[in-house]
Image (spheres, grey):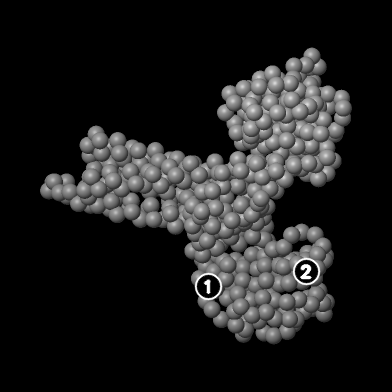
């Protein structure tokens, strides 16, 4: 049997599939004793004599008691997810059976795994770097094509590759600067200052591109916050219901029915949009409704997209132009959506086509032209960079480290301009390397690892 390479001496166990009743459940063990512990209670082939990447049928028993008939999958170190000996037990999906099997493994000597501990061991054993490990969690929680693609790209090393390349180039110059410190009396120069400047400027461009990609990455990972705004009775709640294909919001002829936010997610073209139906935009003497209107304006400022909805049968051009002017001053991308096209007067429609040819005409109540609206919504979210395969930053921790890297690289340029001594120059370069290393896990602390892996589910 292969020798375990992990420094961990204990064996962990956890349910790897979701809680609840299902056809099957998978219980995972990882650690030096995982095969032996299962073999102690497995009735079938001798697992300690079997090859890795094999599956074996048998039963789990404790004394004379048969707990379940199972399939046992063996993954011998280092050819496993954690690079340790790993066993996966596929049982019937009864929660009673799952609990019995896990308790049995604990009695045999395993201990319950902590959240994310399997992935943490994989990282510590060199299976992948920290950015790739974080992508595992993102992949599990991906709920759209875009978020899945971003997580897969990061997990397969796309982002890590760029960071590793940046560090490698900077390490060469750092070593040359450090070497010069050992020869201060000879006044020699191993690292050309002009070459260093060119490198730092090149690295800054890459770092700034990655920083700029975070806005898109955040949208891909968390969804596009999209506010439906307009005066009362424009049909905002009806539109939300039509897009969701369910009666999520209360629809009433009484103006001001929606006094707070109603929010739900919709997948459009592989991108998650978080639609927010808000209180109407109007002046009101109703204290509660006025609070809703005030909060609506705040939501609009923080949105990534606004659907400005107005009723063709109850709005004039003066109102529309006034609202459009308000939205343009907010600086948030918005779409002009004319609702109740079946009730609109032709003169207003013609005027809109002339003054605002980008207006989208729909009927939320009769679900007319909603596909056109979805197409226009998707157009406003620029995914071109992402679709061409460029690296996109989706993690706030990475974004913070990149900003700190940028500041350190700018300090290197300032030092070159001011002709500072080598020790100060080396200090700024080392700081840049430190922050880049934080992303991939070459620089870590116990607190950082605990914080990252505590957010994983147990069993992963």
Vertical side of 20 occupied by 419: above or below = above
Q: Which residue is mark 2?
A: 24
Residue at 51 percent across and 64 percent down: it is 127
Quadrant of the drawing holding the C terminus = bottom right
* Image spot of residue 459 (x, y percent): 67, 61
Q: CA distance from mark 2 to mark 1?
A: 27 Å
Within-10-Å neighbours for mark 1: few <14, some 14–19, many 20+: some
Quarter assignment of residue 140: bottom right
Quadrant of the drawing holding the N terminus = bottom right
SS for tag 1?
loop
Q: Are marks 2 and 1 in contact (CB under 8 Å)?
A: no
Q: Which residue is mark 1?
A: 78
Q: Is residue 329 left or right of residue 257?
A: left
Badge number at residue 198:
none
Q: Nearer the viewer, mark 2 or mark 1?
A: 2
Residue at 80 percent across and 32 percent down: it is 340
Quarter assignment of residue 348: top right
Vertical side of 48 occupied by 207: above or below = above
Within-10-Å neighbours for mark 2: few <14, some 14–19, many 20+: some
* Image spot of residue 397 (x, y percent): 52, 45
In the image shown, does 371 or 200 lie closer to the viewer?
371
* Image spot of residue 87 (x, y percent): 65, 72
Q: Is residue 183 left or right of residue 72?
A: left
* Image spot of residue 20 (x, y percent): 80, 59
Is residue 304 among the parts visible in the rendering? yes
Vertical side of 320 occupied by 96: above or below = below
């Amino acid at each position: 049997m292969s020798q375990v390479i992990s420094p961990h001496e204990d064996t962990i166990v956890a349910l790897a599939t979701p809680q609840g009743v299902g056809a099957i459940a998978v219980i995972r063990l990882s650690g030096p004793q995982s095969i032996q512990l299962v073999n102690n209670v497995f009735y079938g082939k001798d697992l300690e004599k079997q090859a890795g990447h094999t599956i074996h049928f048998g039963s789990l028993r404790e004394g004379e008691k048969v707990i379940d008939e199972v399939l046992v999958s063996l993954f011998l170190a280092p050819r496993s997810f954690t690079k340790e000996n790993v066993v996966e037990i596929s049982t019937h999906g009864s929660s009673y059976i799952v609990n019995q099997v896990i308790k049995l493994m604990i009695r045999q000597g395993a201990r319950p795994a902590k959240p994310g501990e399997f992935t943490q061991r994989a990282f510590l054993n060199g299976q992948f770097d920290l950015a790739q490990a974080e992508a595992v969690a993102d992949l599990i929680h991906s709920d759209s094509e875009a978020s899945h693609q971003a997580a897969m790209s990061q997990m397969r090393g796309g982002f890590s590759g760029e960071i590793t390349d940046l560090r490698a180039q900077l390490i060469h110059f750092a070593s040359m600067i450090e070497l010069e410190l050992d020869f201060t009396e000879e006044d020699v120069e191993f690292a050309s200052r002009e070459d260093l400047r060119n490198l730092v400027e090149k690295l800054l461009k890459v770092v700034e591109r990655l920083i700029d990609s975070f806005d898109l990455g955040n949208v891909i990972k968390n969804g596009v916050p999209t506010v439906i705004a307009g005066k009362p009775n424009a049909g905002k709640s009806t539109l939300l219901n039509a897009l969701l294909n369910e009666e999520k919001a209360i629809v009433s002829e009484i103006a001001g029915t929606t006094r707070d936010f109603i929010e739900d997610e919709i997948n459009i073209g592989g991108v998650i949009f978080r639609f927010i139906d808000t209180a109407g935009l109007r002046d009101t003497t109703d204290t509660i409704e006025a609070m809703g209107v005030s909060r609506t304006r705040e939501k609009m400022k923080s949105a990534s997209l606004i659907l400005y909805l107005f009723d063709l049968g109850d709005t004039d051009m003066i109102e529309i132009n006034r609202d459009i002017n308000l939205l343009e001053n907010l600086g948030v991308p918005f779409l002009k959506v004319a609702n109740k096209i079946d009730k609109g007067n032709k003169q207003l429609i013609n005027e809109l086509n002339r003054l605002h040819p980008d207006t989208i005409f729909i009927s939320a109540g009769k679900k007319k032209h909603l596909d056109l609206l979805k197409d226009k919504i998707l157009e406003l979210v620029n995914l071109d960079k992402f679709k061409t395969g460029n690296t996109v930053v989706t993690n706030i921790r990475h974004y913070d480290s990149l900003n700190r890297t940028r500041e350190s690289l700018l300090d290197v340029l300032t030092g070159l301009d001011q002709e500072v001594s080598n020790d100060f120059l080396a200090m700024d370069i080392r700081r840049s390397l430190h922050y880049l290393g934080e992303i991939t896990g070459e620089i870590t602390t116990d607190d950082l690892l605990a914080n990252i892996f505590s957010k994983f589910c147990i069993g992963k």
